[in-house]
């Protein structure tokens, strides 16, 4: 009787293609077979059932939809996964084909296939691993958030990292890395897990250093910006020597996408290496790339890194100045004067290089020689949403004013007047007040009599004298009060009577106003 049943079942399965494309009838017969306990005594029948379901899925249309409409069919087959090598290989292929379409992925999630795939990954042979990894990857691509949540909920990161450590083929390693990348992209818990796993981070850096498989390198490099966004991960990656590896990759002339990911990672890490002095070759590499690329994103990343590395590091500043950084940065300002984002970082770097540094004077001179000063002054505007750009610009101009040879050009372009006017309009916070006053103070300290008169004229014309008098007469501002008093003292000793008169009249009116307020 059993043999007769088996024979009929096999005949039925073998000839299903002739049943007038009645998908419902075919699926109904498959379900009947799976509901019959005798079916499970013959692995041949189970394999034929699996092949039939797989063929229905491959053929698509109404046949595939009928399978999708009966999730119990997949649930039953899933329970047989890893019970027989041939059957497991067939089921792995079936699940893979389901994962190609979004509805199939939903079915895999609904029927609990994901945790079963993860649980059995480590014990499977290579061809099945390929199917399983591709299935997981397809799920993460097709329904990223839901799939990432399901995979991570069943220790997906831990399982995949374990496989990564055991080093399979390049293709499998790339699938593993890509699954981990997508988990980090679409699931916060997975991202945190990867960022805090020293074992994984060490393995990632080691593989990146050793592999010659470009696809795997690219996948790992894409992962690094996500990982390096975490403050604690930065120091771990630096400790594992990721920086020289990324520098080597930059020299290998990969396409601009890989360069971008490397540079974005280095930008994330750069605030942690400000006080380290062993990155001279990296800085020189950046200065070589900057003038040779037209990719604005690459330029922005490099300038952001140089801005960080030139912050309070005398050695890095001197190295940049000696390697033509000023001319390179000035060229970028001239060529990109409508891009506030890249301009701000460029001005910030120039401000660092022209500040406290043994070669600061040379840096200030190079800026003038390269005709950059007129381009800087154009950013002295009142756009409130660009305060950070304005602040950086004023700080750079203040540094430039420390060199007497720059003062003539700064005065010719009425930079003092513009800064004084901004001071009058934007005196809203102590930070802004101090920036404006210290800059005006630097201008007033110069000794050239002709320039001195021009500077005094511009300060008075800007309308900020009353503001200076108010701060000078206040007892709440300390250094701001002291600098305000010294600027006003300079003006009150001017050779021009109109300067002295303006100071006296303004002082009187402010005192009268203060008296009336107190009365």
Image (cartoon, rainbow, N blue to C red):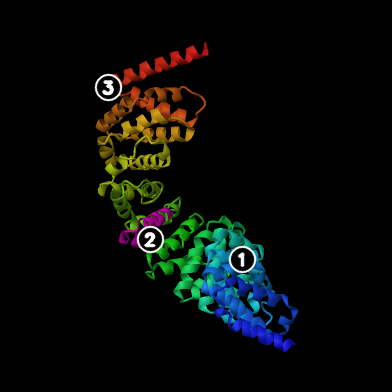
Q: How far separated are the C-alphas under marks 1 and 2?
A: 57 Å
Magenta-span inclusion, residue 289 = yes
Quadrant of res 42:
bottom right
- Report the residue that reaches farthest toward the front: 20
Q: Nearer the viewer, mark 2 or mark 3?
A: 2
Residue found at x 43% / y 66%: 247
Kind of element beneath mark 3 = loop
Q: Is residue 171 left or right of residue 13?
A: left
Q: Which mark is residue 286?
A: 2
Q: Counting other residues with Cα less than 10 Å from the Cα at mark 2, is it few (<14), some (14-19), or many (20 or more)?
A: many
Q: CA distance from mark 2 to mark 3?
A: 51 Å
Type of secondary structure dominating the magenta stretch: helix
Contact, mark 1 vs mark 2 (Cβ under 8 Å): no
Count the numbered circles shown. Answer: 3
Q: In the image, which is nearer the foreground, mark 3 or mark 1?
A: 1
Q: Nearer the viewer, residue 176 or 229?
A: 176
Residue at the (30%, 48%) spot, across then down: 367
Where residue 131 appears, as percent x and y from the top left, is: 56, 76
**Helix, strand or loop for disc 2:** helix
Query: Please, is residue 183 above or below residue 82 in the view?
Result: above
Residue at the disc numbered 1: 69
Task: Give residue 346's mark.
Answer: none
> Which residues lie in the magenta part?
284-304
Element type where label 1 sits in the image: loop
Residue 392 seen anywhere in this rendered image of the structure: yes
Relative placement, left or right, of 299 versus 188 is: left
Numbered label attached to residue 496: 3
């Amino acid at each position: 009787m059993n043999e007769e049943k088996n024979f009929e079942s096999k005949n039925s399965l073998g000839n299903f293609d002739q049943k007038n494309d009645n998908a419902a009838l075919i699926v109904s017969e498959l379900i009947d077979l799976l509901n019959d306990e005798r079916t499970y005594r013959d692995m041949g029948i189970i394999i034929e059932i699996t092949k039939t379901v797989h063929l229905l899925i491959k053929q698509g249309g109404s046949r595939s939809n009928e399978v999708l409409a009966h999730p119990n069919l997949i649930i039953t087959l899933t329970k047989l996964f890893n019970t027989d090598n041939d059957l497991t290989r067939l089921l792995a292929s079936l699940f893979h084909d389901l994962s190609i379409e979004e509805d199939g992925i939903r079915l895999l999630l609904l029927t609990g296939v994901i945790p079963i795939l993860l649980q059995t990954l480590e014990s499977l042979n290579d061809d099945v691993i390929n199917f399983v990894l591709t299935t997981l990857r397809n799920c993460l691509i097709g329904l990223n958030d839901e799939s990432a949540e399901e995979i991570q909920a069943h220790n997906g990161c831990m399982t995949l990292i374990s496989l990564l450590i055991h080093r399979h083929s390049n293709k499998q390693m790339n699938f593993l890395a890509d699954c981990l990348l997508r988990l980090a992209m679409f699931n916060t818990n997975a991202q945190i897990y990867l960022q805090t796993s020293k074992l994984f981070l060490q393995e990632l850096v080691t593989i990146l250093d050793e592999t010659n498989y470009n696809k795997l390198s690219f996948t790992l490099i894409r992962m690094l910006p996500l990982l390096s966004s975490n403050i604690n991960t930065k120091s771990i990656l630096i400790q594992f020597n990721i920086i020289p590896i990324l520098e080597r990759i930059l020299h290998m002339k990969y396409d601009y996408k890989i360069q971008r990911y490397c540079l974005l990672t280095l930008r994330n890490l750069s605030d942690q290496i400000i006080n380290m002095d062993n990155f001279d070759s990296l800085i020189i590499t950046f200065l070589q790339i900057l003038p040779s690329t037209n990719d604005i994103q690459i330029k922005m990343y490099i300038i952001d890194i140089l801005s960080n590395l030139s912050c309070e590091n005398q050695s890095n500043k001197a190295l940049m100045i000696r390697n033509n950084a000023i001319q390179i940065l000035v060229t970028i300002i001239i060529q990109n004067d409508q891009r506030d984002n890249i301009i701000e970082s460029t001005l910030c770097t120039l401000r660092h290089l022209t500040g406290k540094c043994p070669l600061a004077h040379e840096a200030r001179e190079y800026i003038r020689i390269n005709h950059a000063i007129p381009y800087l002054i154009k950013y002295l505007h009142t756009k409130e949403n660009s305060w950070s750009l304005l602040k950086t610009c004023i700080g750079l101009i203040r540094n430039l004013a420390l060199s007497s040879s720059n003062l003539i050009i700064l005065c010719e372009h009425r930079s003092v007047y513009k800064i004084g006017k901004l001071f009058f309009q934007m005196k809203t916070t102590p930070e802004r007040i101090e920036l404006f006053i210290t800059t005006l103070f630097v201008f007033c300290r110069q000794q050239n009599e002709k320039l001195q008169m021009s500077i005094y004229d511009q300060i008075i014309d800007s309308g900020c004298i009353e503001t200076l008098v108010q701060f000078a007469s206040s007892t709440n501002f300390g250094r701001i009060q002291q600098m305000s008093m010294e600027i006003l003292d300079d003006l009150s000793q001017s050779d021009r009577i109109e300067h002295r008169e303006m100071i006296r009249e303004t002082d009187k009116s402010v005192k009268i106003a203060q008296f009336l307020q107190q009365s």
